[in-house]
Image (cartoon, grey):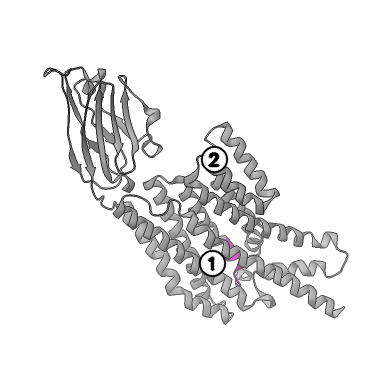
């Protein structure tokens, strides 16, 4: 039977408005006939998604119950404040996804009460504005320079002015996107996704120079570096970033990820499905789709590497006098000279203009929608970016194979 001397009242409901990156306090005061530390449970939850933010159970905070989204970002006040019934908590480094209603609930026996705090529309921070500006730069530069760059390619124009346009087109937009994704990761905490996307955009510069018809205008040492390392470096870096976020999650996960890496090399086609299935069982649903897309991207790079190795070793295993010439032709098929075709210009422009526009629009739209809705529209941007990215190396691979086949057919006709 409940008497008048027994009570439990929770107060402190209010509305909070703040900018992304700031620290805020969500108020909750518990007034009861018993000492606050003797309460059965006091918990904070995000209402719309039923996410556990904090829980005070049996006189102790239970940090392991905090959702990963809020890990290391939430803390209750001091024990002295808790003894006064103050169960307010600080939320550090506010993110756009933190928008919404939060409920503070207290329980003791038959008693229960709650209060709500609402985090309203979050304003853009200066870093968010910086990301948008970088996305605009990455979109405008290819749109403005795309046509003159294409014309100079068709005319085989290697003048200083034409090359300046090409260098600006390749470097400016991709560096801007790399910086934008780095800021995105720092602000919103999507580190693995941001690291992978920034690496892809930065390494695209090397890839574009590798396919560029004007590569022969570079110094010889730089040409050799680009030809030898463009594909290998991209494969190594993307693979490292793709799986770096998974290796710190325990030995059991490490073993399974090692299996996936072996499958990466041994069995490309079936491994895509196994990636999807294994990552589902490992509670990586948020990263599963993005990692599966990256696996497919790595398979394309693997095909290019294998073809390059075959061509590089062609002279060692063939006694035909034209074998070294074949290797030279295939190498030149991605750069200059007589092997230059309209296909090279199309693939080059796809990488320099098309991919930059897709990346910048995808990031800008996701940033704006997340600020407005308080949650992500696309759980992983790699699901959008990587499939488009695959088209570029596939085009490069087709050019290599085409040049190889064409030269061998011409050689046979001569014989």
Q: Residue furthest left?
A: 4
Element under disc 1 = helix
Whether residue 99 appears in this view of the structure is yes
Going by the image, does 166 lie left or right of 98?
right
Q: Which residue is mark 1?
A: 351
**Which residue is located at x 22 percent, y 43 percent?**
118
Q: Residue at x 47, y 46 (%)?
A: 286
Secondary structure that dominates the magenta span: helix
Q: Quadrant of the N terminus?
A: top left
Task: State the residue lying farthest toward the bottom.
Answer: 155
The question of residue 26 being in magenta is answered with no
The residue drawn where x is 34% and y is 43% is 49
- Provide residue 150's location: percent of width, then percent of height: 52, 77
- Looking at the picture, does residue 334 appear above or below residue 292? below
| Marks 1 and 2, how far apart at CA | 35 Å
Give how far across and how far down residue 379 sits, in percent: 43, 51
Categorize mark 2 by other alpha carbons within 10 Å: few (<14), some (14-19), many (20+): few
Q: Decide whether residue 210 is among the magenta residues.
A: yes
The residue that label 2 is drawn on is 281
Quarter the C terminus occupies: bottom right
Range of residues picked out in magenta: 207-213
Label 1, residues with CA under 10 Å away: few <14, some 14-19, many ≥20: many
């Amino acid at each position: 039977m409940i008497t008048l001397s027994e009570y439990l009242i929770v107060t402190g409901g209010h509305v909070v408005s703040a900018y992304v990156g700031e620290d805020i306090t969500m108020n909750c005061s518990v007034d009861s006939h018993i000492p606050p530390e003797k309460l059965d449970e006091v918990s904070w939850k995000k209402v719309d998604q039923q996410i556990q933010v904090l829980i005070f159970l049996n006189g102790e905070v239970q940090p392991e119950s905090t959702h990963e989204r809020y890990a290391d970002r939430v803390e209750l006040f001091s024990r002295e404040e808790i003894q006064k019934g103050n169960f307010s908590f600080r939320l550090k480094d506010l993110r756009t996804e933190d928008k919404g209603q939060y409920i503070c609930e207290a329980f003791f026996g038959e008693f229960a009460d709650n209060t709500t705090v609402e985090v309203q529309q979050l304003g853009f921070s200066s870093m968010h504005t910086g990301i948008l500006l970088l996305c605009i730069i990455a979109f405008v530069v290819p749109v403005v320079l795309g046509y003159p760059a294409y014309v100079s390619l068709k005319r085989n124009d290697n003048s200083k002015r034409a090359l300046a346009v090409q260098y600006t087109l390749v470097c400016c937009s991709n560096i801007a996107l790399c910086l934008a994704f780095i800021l995105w990761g720092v602000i919103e905490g999507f580190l693995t996704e941001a690291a992978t996307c920034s690496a892809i955009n930065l390494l695209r510069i090397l890839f574009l120079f590798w396919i560029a018809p004007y590569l022969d205008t570079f110094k010889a040492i730089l040409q050799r570096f680009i030809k030898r390392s463009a594909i290998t470096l991209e494969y190594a870096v993307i693979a490292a970033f793709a799986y770096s976020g998974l290796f710190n999650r325990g030995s059991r996960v490490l073993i399974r990820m090692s299996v996936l890496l072996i499958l990466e090399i041994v069995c490309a086609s079936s491994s895509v499905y196994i990636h999807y299935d294994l990552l589902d069982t490992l509670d990586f649903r948020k990263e599963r789709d993005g990692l599966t897309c990256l696996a497919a991207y790595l398979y394309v790079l693997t095909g290019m590497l294998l073809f390059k190795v075959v061509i590089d070793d062609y002279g060692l295993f063939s006694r035909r006098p034209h074998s070294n010439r074949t290797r030279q032709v295939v190498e030149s098929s991605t750069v200059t000279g007589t092997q230059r075709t309209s296909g090279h210009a199309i693939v080059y422009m796809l990488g320099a203009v098309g991919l930059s526009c897709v990346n910048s629009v995808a990031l800008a739209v996701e940033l704006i929608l997340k600020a407005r809705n308080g949650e992500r529209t696309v759980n992983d941007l790699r699901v959008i970016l990587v499939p488009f990215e695959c088209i570029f190396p596939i085009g490069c691979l087709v050019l290599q194979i085409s040049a190889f086949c064409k030269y061998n057919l011409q050689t046979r006709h001569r014989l």
